[in-house]
Amino acid sequence: MTEPATTSTTDGRGRYRSAMRLDDKTAIITGGSNGIGRACATRFSREGASIVVADLLVDEGRAAAAAIEADGGRAIFVELEASDPESNRAMVDAAVDAFGTVDVLVTAAGISHGGYLSGDAEADRKRYTAAAERADTPAASLTELDIDDWRRVLDVNLTGTLLAVQAMAKTLIDQDRSGSIVTIASIAAVDPLWGAPSYPVSKAGVWMLTKNAARTLAPVGIRVNSIGPGFIETNMTAVMSEVEEIHGVVMGGTPLGRKGTPDEVANVALFLASDEASFVTGELIHPDGGWFTG
């Protein structure tokens, strides 16, 4: 019996390796400068993809792309304002200009509140501390919600996801290519958690958008799935452990008894992006340590 043939290619440093799950594909990662987005960018690159790191944070985004190239991969950085239609179209056009095609989109850009800036630990510390102090007046998170905060969260998390999906899908259709889109929702999409409604409503919207897009785009060969992470070790959750009341709720609701890592979410995204998930669309997968089991 003849043994099946194996294929090999060389990476950016001339090293031979067997074919990987995203060989010859181009992946756009919004929010790719840090956290889950950066983990996806790094993981996908090591599986053979050319990477577009798209982010509002210019220095951090360029550093993420440079790190991928230093590791032997191919990457560019594109500045992205998630809530702007033109910025999303320019992002996808840049991917095609740089690498010829586009195959995968991961929408990891997101904010937890209207004033959120990744890495601003002091602002997060004040916000979480204030939230803990208001525990005896829980209705205030709704009745005193600032409408500008609400709009900004939905603009980035929900409208930003829609705009990225639109731009990606249009390009895939124009190129007559199939593709995979992975949106990043949250356990908050199915569990309202606590505090202001802006974040859980935005993520519930991402989940329903994903289901709608999956139905709409399946006939043209585009799969759309979502990931609903639990509490992951990122800039967005870094300060939670310092606020005892919040840390207790997080650990008490996570049966595995710890936060997850960005790499653990990236592993799920890799599966959904790859041909291993070729018959999977319209699904929401929870890497959440057991938080949501309903």
Image (cartoon, rainbow, N blue to C red):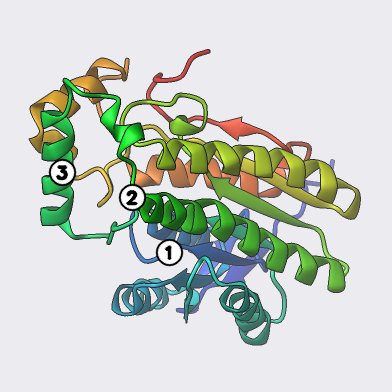
Which residue lies at the image location 55% right of the left edge and 72% below the top edge? Answer: 84
Outermost residue, bottom side: 97
**In the depicted structure, whether residue 144 falls above or below residue 67:** above
Q: Position of residue 147 (x, y in %)?
A: 40, 50
Number of marks in the image?
Answer: 3
Q: Position of residue 163 (x, y in %)?
A: 63, 63
The amino acid sitting under disc 1 is Gly
Which residue lies at the image location 61% right of the left edge and 49% below the top edge? Answer: 182
**In the depicted structure, whether residue 196 falls above or below residue 91:** above
Q: Looking at the rendering, in which quadrant would you find the N terminus?
A: top right
Instruction: Identify the mark nearer the N-term, 2 or 3.
Output: 2
Instruction: Identify the mark nearer the N-term, 1 or 2.
Output: 1
Residue 32, which numbered label? 1
- Residue identified by numbered label 2: 113
Q: Pick the residue in front: 18 or 215.
A: 215
Task: Confirm or deny contact between disc 1 and disc 3 (CB under 8 A).
Answer: no
Q: Position of residue 70 (x, y in %)?
A: 36, 77
Q: Nearer the viewer, mark 1 or mark 2?
A: 2
**In the depicted structure, whether residue 186 falls above or below residue 77:** above
Task: Confirm or deny contact between disc 1 and disc 2 (CB under 8 A).
Answer: no
Q: Pick the residue in front: 234 or 205.
A: 205
Which residue lies at the image location 55% right of the left edge and 60% below the top edge? Answer: 160
Q: Secondary structure at mark 3?
A: loop
Which residue lies at the image location 34% right of the left edge and 54% below the top edge? Answer: 35
For the question of whether residue 248 can be seen, the reply is yes
The amino acid sitting under disc 3 is Val
Q: Secondary structure at mark 1?
A: loop
The amino acid sitting under disc 2 is His
What whole-number distance in Å separates the C-alpha atoms at marks 1 and 2? Answer: 19 Å
Q: Nearer the viewer, mark 2 or mark 3?
A: 2
Q: Is residue 117 left or right of residue 133?
A: right
